[in-house]
Amino acid sequence: MSTATQFEQTGSLSSPGPIGRLVRLGLGLWITYAFFQFLDIGFLDAQKADRFFSWQTPTHSSFWIAVLIFFWVFPYVFNIGFSRNWRRKPQWLLVGALVVAATVGYALEGSLWSPAMGWLILIWLLYVTAHLGFSFLLAAVLGTPGCEMRAFHHLWTILTEKKLENIIVPVFSIESTNGKQIGQRKLKKRYQYESRKKCSILGCPHSLTGGPATSTDF
């Protein structure tokens, strides 16, 4: 699945309905709960912290499932939340840091897991769950159009009346766009592609501007 971001001007997307807001609220509560669970592991429960920041690899399957889920959504959280189009670079940077921590841990104690690895993963999980969870909650309250990760940007536009871009993310946004408009954009892009393909073989009997040729196209 592509991680490229697609920005739309403010006002071009409609707000989600009641079901969309409820889904956002539910996801926001679940992810925020995960945030406090990770906070408990690292800072609130001394026994859990001692085990987590040791040289013993965590064995709870729920922890590793959570790591996989948040690793998958990480590029979207970072790129959309900070208005970047870095695709999977945030993931690769994280993987690079984990490889370094694992290498050092193995060199010192013969273990890929180390206290440094624990801190690295925990701080990353706290960031992702905080940013994503509170974005879902805020998006549910404000009715943010497009992707939930633009909720803080939406709040900024409300407070300052400055327009910022919205964004469409097919999987992670609770769909709030006009399906007809999306279909028209896809049809136009396909028409342009077919026109260019035909031009390369037969010349240019069609306009490359997205519609049938007119007298101004020649």
Image: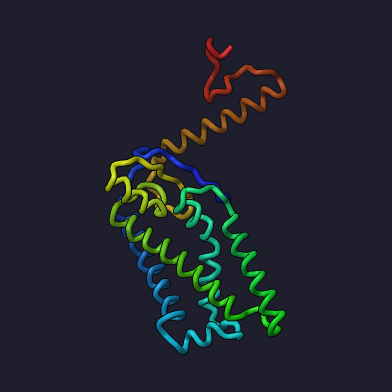
Question: x and y percent of residue 164 in the render?
Answer: 38, 42
Quarter of the image holding residue 205? top right
Q: How many marks?
A: 0
Of 204 and 151, nearer the camera is 151
Left or right: 2 with respect to 99?
left
Residue 140 placement (x, y as % from top left): 32, 57
204 in relation to 181, above or below: above
Which residue lies at the image location 56% right of the left edge and 14% below the top edge? 217
Image coloring type: rainbow
Instruction: Depth check: give the residue in front, 198 or 83.
Output: 83
| Residue 126, horizontal then vertical, whole percent | 45, 69
Answer with left or right where residue 218 lies relative to residue 13: right
Q: Quadrant of the C terminus?
A: top right
Q: Is residue 16 visible?
A: no
Which residue sits at x=61%, y=85%?
Answer: 55
Whether residue 139 can be seen here: yes
Identify which residue is drawn at 72% across, 23% down: 201
Instruction: Relative to 202, say whether 11 is above or below.
Output: below
* Image height of 110 relative to 149, above or below: below
Which residue is most to the bottom?
47
Image coordinates of residue 117 in percent, x first then y, are: 59, 75
State the residue in front, 59 or 198: 59
Residue at 40%, 51% (x, y): give it: 150
